[in-house]
Amino acid sequence: ELNKQFGEVFELVEPEPVAAASIGQVYKGRLLKNGQTVAIKIQRPNTEEIVALDLFVLRWWGGVYNGIFRLLGRDIDLQSVMDDFGTLLYQEIDYVAEAANARRFTELYAQD
């Protein structure tokens, strides 16, 4: 997503992750252009495809359970719950938006 190879921008300070992120891992790294130490959040491979399949299966089962709930006289829509969950999950894996939010936060609170 940087439109560059990882090694052109960063070098890892430690080969092992220093923390777990929601759907990735955080490494201690260094920017090659100025030597600044940074946290590098790396998403696990194939995350979007895995999430899409999982949400598809959850929505399918939600539909099955919706039918059972209707038979029991309950008005519960699990597919809507899965849709809301999916929206939040896709926001969570959007590292480009997260980086933009971090830059904006820095701009807003740089003086504090």
Image (cartoon, rainbow, N blue to C red):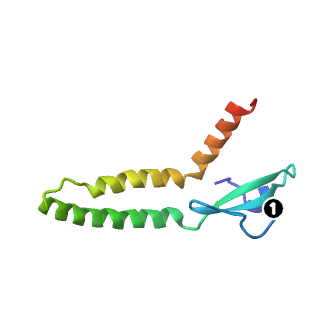
* Residue 93: percent from left, percent from top: 54, 55
Name the residue that disc number 1 marks: 11
Point 78% across, 55% down: residue: 9
Judging depth in this view, the residue of 97 and 5 nearest the camera is: 97
Point 77% across, 53% down: residue: 38
Label 1 element class: strand
Q: Is residue 78 depicted above or below 102 in this figure?
A: below
* Residue 16: percent from left, percent from top: 74, 70
Q: Is residue 9 depicted above or below 57 in this figure?
A: above
* Residue 37: percent from left, percent from top: 82, 53
Judging depth in this view, the residue of 78 and 74 nearest the camera is: 74
Point 81% across, 61% down: residue: 11
Residue 24 falls in image quadrant: bottom right
Judging depth in this view, the residue of 72 and 22 nearest the camera is: 72
Point 55% across, 52% down: residue: 94
Q: State which quarter of the image contains the C terminus.
A: top right
- Dot 1, how many residues are within 10 Å of its Cα: few (below 14), some (14-19), or many (20+)? some
Q: State which quarter of the image contains the N terminus.
A: bottom right
Q: Is residue 106 depicted above or below 23 in this figure?
A: above
